[in-house]
């Protein structure tokens, strides 16, 4: 299958829900202007509760180690799925890519996430940043792009598991009822696990991460006597497929900002986020680079043999059948971890958008016992199940393109807030002046722009349709707020209605 390139403490004090901010007497148009000129504080960033739950009943539960592994699974989950990079450009370029890309791409996005997650430590993450920088339309549109990219990306993991399981049960590898049933069944079951609560998901990610990384640690150690550096220079037949290569790199190493949507659930986010992101960058870079060095340097397979699932074959060649099966099982375990981590991110994003008044208050409802945003999980499960019927390549392509659009707006929000609101309290602050920050964001932004420009026409069409859907959805929510047709978070709905009314004058 050829993928279509797409080319995905001290804290800010904010008014509690139910407390409307007092505005000096002014015209509607002036209120609307100031709404876009100042960071808006009509929600609680201190704690991630919805309007239907008390603040004291949902204490922050995520500490450093679980957050590291949640980020690990949101971004990578191990080297599974990286085989196509070797097939597209050969071992040497793949090793260079996975050595350079986590730092050239991951570090800037991690720094942006660390600063803004500490400045706005509430659920919703990047939606809050864009909303405070450019207003509700920007926040809603960024939320649409990122949320759809997350749930579309989630749909790829059951398909990836089916590819690996297909080596044992061939009926699952081929299109048909067996594969469809497996993919949908896994989607529903794994979504149900998310109801256990974010604390269990976080510590479960730690366990899954250790178990899924263990076979690669063994494979790397056992490969040392068999390594032949000349094998890293093996060439692909014909021309290199750079679009597939960069698409594979991007798909394996994006979503560094996804954990920000759960910032309201993190213990002391002003210190925990920067440390967790720093550890995650190193862990992810090593988890790709060392196994790929071992598999390409200790086996004689040509680049054409590198298809999804080949890492398990390489483990078998290096360590024996037992290691092959463990590595194959690790793919299933890793996909479960990625599914759970990203489902949590998407669900808490919807909860944050509801707390911000961009979605009806229904999406902020939590389970009484676990604090899980159950309505948001149900909605995410429904979207993911529908997307499961798309081909794997289409899933990856669409997710990457939407993620690129959203991240460009995210970088713009970061720079705008630093330039226009330098006084905003930032418990963690990237230690660079504004010109250096512009340069820091330019490299990943150039790559994101390249991803968007070279995308195929089908990806353009799907992305344009989903973007139009997002703009239309924002318009519908605006009418519902003005007409009070649906219930919104009372803390910010009045602010939005005032701004919306001002825009219509």
Image: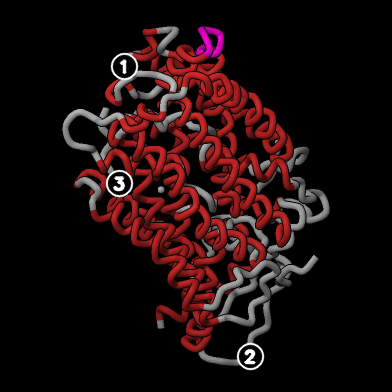
Q: Earlier in the sequence, mark 2 or mark 3?
A: 3
Residue in the picture at 69% in, 63% down:
45
Q: Position of residue 93 (x, y in %)?
A: 34, 40
Residue in the picture at 50% in, 27% down:
187
Instruction: Specify the label residue 6 is tagged with.
Output: 3
Kindly check if marks 1 and 3 are in contact, taking CB atoms under 8 A apart as contact: no
314 falls in the magenta region: no
* Mark 2 element type: loop
Q: Quick one: label 3, few (<14), some, or many (20+) residues within 10 Å?
A: many
Query: For the N terminus, which image quadrant?
Result: top left
The mark closer to the camera, 2 or 1, is: 1
Give, as a single range, the part of the protein colored magenta: 319-324
Q: Residue furthest right?
A: 56
Q: Quadrant of residue 167?
A: top left
Q: Earlier in the sequence, mark 2 or mark 1?
A: 2
Residue 19 in the image: above or below residue 265: below
Q: What residue is shown with label 1? A: 175
Whether residue 237 sits left or right of residue 39 in the image: it is left
Q: CA distance from mark 2 to mark 3?
A: 48 Å
Q: What residue is shown with label 2? A: 24
Residue 479 visible in image: no
């Amino acid at each position: 299958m050829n993928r279509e390139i797409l080319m995905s403490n001290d804290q800010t004090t904010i008014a509690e829900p139910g407390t409307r901010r007092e505005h000096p007497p002014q015209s509607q148009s002036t209120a609307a202007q100031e709404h876009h000129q100042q960071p808006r504080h009509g929600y609680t960033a201190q704690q991630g509760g919805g309007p239907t739950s008390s603040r004291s009943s949902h204490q922050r539960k995520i500490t450093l180690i679980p957050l590291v592994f949640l980020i690990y699974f949101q971004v990578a989950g191990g080297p599974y799925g990286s085989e196509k990079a070797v097939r597209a450009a050969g071992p040497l370029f793949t090793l260079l890519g996975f050595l350079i890309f986590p730092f050239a791409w991951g570090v800037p996005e991690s720094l942006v996430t660390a600063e803004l997650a500490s400045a706005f430590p509430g659920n919703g993450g990047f939606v809050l940043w864009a909303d405070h920088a450019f207003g509700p339309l920007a926040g809603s549109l960024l939320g649409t792009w990122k949320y759809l990219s997350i749930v579309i990306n989630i749909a790829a993991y059951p398909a990836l598991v089916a590819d690996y399981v297909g080596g044992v049960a061939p009926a699952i590898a081929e299109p048909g009822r067996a594969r469809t049933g497996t993919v949908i069944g896994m989607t529903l079951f794994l979504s149900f696990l998310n109801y256990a609560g974010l604390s269990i998901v976080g510590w479960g990610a730690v366990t899954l991460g250790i178990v899924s990384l263990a076979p690669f640690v063994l494979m790397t150690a056992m490969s040392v006597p068999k390594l032949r550096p000349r094998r890293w220079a093996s060439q692909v037949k014909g021309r290199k497929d750079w679009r597939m290569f960069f698409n594979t790199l991007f798909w394996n190493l994006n979503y560094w900002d996804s954990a920000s949507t759960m910032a309201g659930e993190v213990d002391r986010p002003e210190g925990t986020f920067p440390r967790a992101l720093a550890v995650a960058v190193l862990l992810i870079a090593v988890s790709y680079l060392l196994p790929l060095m071992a598999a390409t340097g200790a086996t004689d397979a040509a680049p054409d043999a590198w298809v999804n699932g080949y890492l398990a074959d390489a483990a078998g060649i290096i360590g024996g059948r037992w290691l092959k099966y463990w590595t194959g099982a690790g793919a299933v375990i890793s996909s479960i971890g990625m599914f759970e981590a990203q489902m949590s991110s998407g669900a808490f994003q919807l909860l944050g958008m509801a707390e911000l008044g961009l979605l009806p208050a229904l999406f902020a409802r939590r389970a009484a016992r676990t604090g899980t945003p159950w309505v948001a999980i149900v909605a995410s499960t429904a979207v993911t199940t529908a997307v499961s019927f798309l081909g794997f390549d289409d899933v990856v392509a669409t997710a990457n393109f939407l993620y690129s659009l959203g991240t460009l707006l995210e970088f713009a929000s970061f720079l705008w807030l630093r330039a226009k609101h330098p006084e905003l309290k930032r418990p963690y602050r990237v230690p660079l002046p504004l010109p250096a920050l512009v340069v820091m964001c330019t490299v990943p932004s150039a790559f994101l722009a390249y991803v968007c420009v070279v995308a195929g026409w089908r990806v353009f069409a799907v992305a344009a349709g989903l973007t139009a859907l997002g703009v239309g959805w924002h318009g519908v929510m605006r009418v519902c707020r003005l007409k009070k047709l649906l219930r919104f978070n009372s803390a910010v709905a009045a602010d939005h209605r005032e701004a919306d009314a001002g825009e219509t004058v």
